[in-house]
Amino acid sequence: MAKKIRQGTVFWQREHSAHREHPRYSSHNPDLVIARKWLSQGVTAKEKILDIGAGAGKITSGLQNTRQSVVSLDPTNITTHHHKIPQTSVRGISQNLPFKNNSFNRVLMAYSLTYAPSIKKALREAKRVVKQNGVLVVLLHKPKSIYMYELEGHMMDLRNLAYKLREWQELGLWNRPYPIEGIAFRAKTKKEFEAKVKSIEEQVNYLDRMLERQERIFSDEAKTTKYFESQGFEVQTITTPRPTVNNKQHYTGYALLLKNK
Ligand SMILES: C[S@@+](CC[C@H](N)C(=O)[O-])C[C@H]1O[C@@H](n2cnc3c(N)ncnc32)[C@H](O)[C@@H]1O
């Protein structure tokens, strides 16, 4: 379990803090506003929201209706939550949710679904814990959006580093400083060096797979809709709410409002 939780989070620990400060990911972005609206509209009695892959809880921390409460789930412990409504944090992964069937009225996956090693499993779990006729709100980065280009740039750096370190390993040059994010590291032992090389290669493979899947499953709205329908959800709305510049979509994502049939 502990090993599983580590998967895919090493990269994110760096990326997360950058993302939180990222001007393009401010609280005023249209997709955050839409997601909040979907999560809070028509609340008539007390209800619980599950925020899967909550990170810093950017979306649910902006909810106002105190009839609602939030359970924030994330594999990392880097969460900083300042919610206006009752909130609890749980450590866990989307493909194995530690909750009983039909526990939540509304579930949110904001830019976290594609981090799961299996998207299918993550959706099966989300469907299991959301009540019938309950709502799943999903935000996704669109392939070829600026965010994905940024991620690909980061991948290129990681790939170069993995290549270089593998070469050093073959030459027995393990006791050299090597750069990560502009900071020089030097392994104390050969074993430590080899573990680092392996972990960087794992990150490259993990992100490669994530990008490949994203391209294949979510390349356009029609395909995305079909995919969620095939997983037993009714797609009530799908929208690409990011603003456009010169009629080209920049940093665009999808926002989906799904109903558990
Ligand atoms: C792009 S961030 C989004 C964070 C937050 N939802 C937001 O909108 O600010 C992706 C999040 O997914 C989490 N994550 C990574 N692997 C996961 C998994 N297998 N299950 C659930 N969450 C995961 C990361 O720790 C990170 O917090």
Image (tube, rainbow, N blue to C red):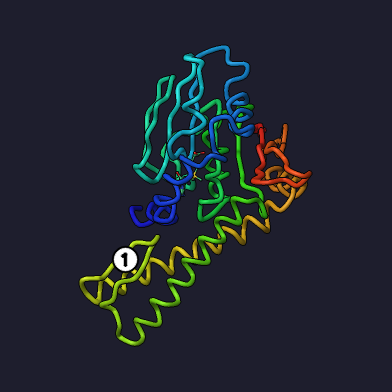
Query: For mark 1, does the 10 Å Cα neighbourhood hold few (<14), some (14 to 19), or many (20 or more) residues?
Result: few
Foreground: 178 or 130? 178
The residue most toward the left is 188
Where residue 189 appears, as percent x and y from the top left, is 21, 74
Residue indicated by mark 1:
184
Q: Is residue 167 left or right of residue 44?
A: left
The residue most toward the top is 44
Foreground: 201 or 97? 201
Relative to 39, say whether 215 is above or below: below
Q: Is residue 88 left or right of residue 233?
A: left
Three-letter amino acid code at disc 1?
Ala
Where residue 170 appears, as percent x and y from the top left, is 36, 86
Q: Residue at x 51, y 51 (%)?
A: 115
The residue most toward the bottom is 171
Q: Residue at x 50, y 25 (%)?
A: 62
Establish whether ligand 1 lies closer than 8 Å to the Cβ of label 1: no
The quarter holding residue 139 reads: top right
Foreground: 154 or 259? 154
Q: Which residue is drawn at 25% across and 74% down?
A: 191
Relative to 217, say whether 109 is above or below: above
Q: In which quarter of the image is the C terminus?
A: top right
Q: How many labels, in total?
A: 1
Secondary structure at badge 1 equals strand
Foreground: 163 or 250? 250
Where residue 174 appears, as percent x and y from the top left, is 29, 79
Q: Residue at x 72, y 37 (%)?
A: 238
Relative to 84, say whether 173 is above or below: below
Where residue 185 appears, as percent x and y from the top left, is 29, 66
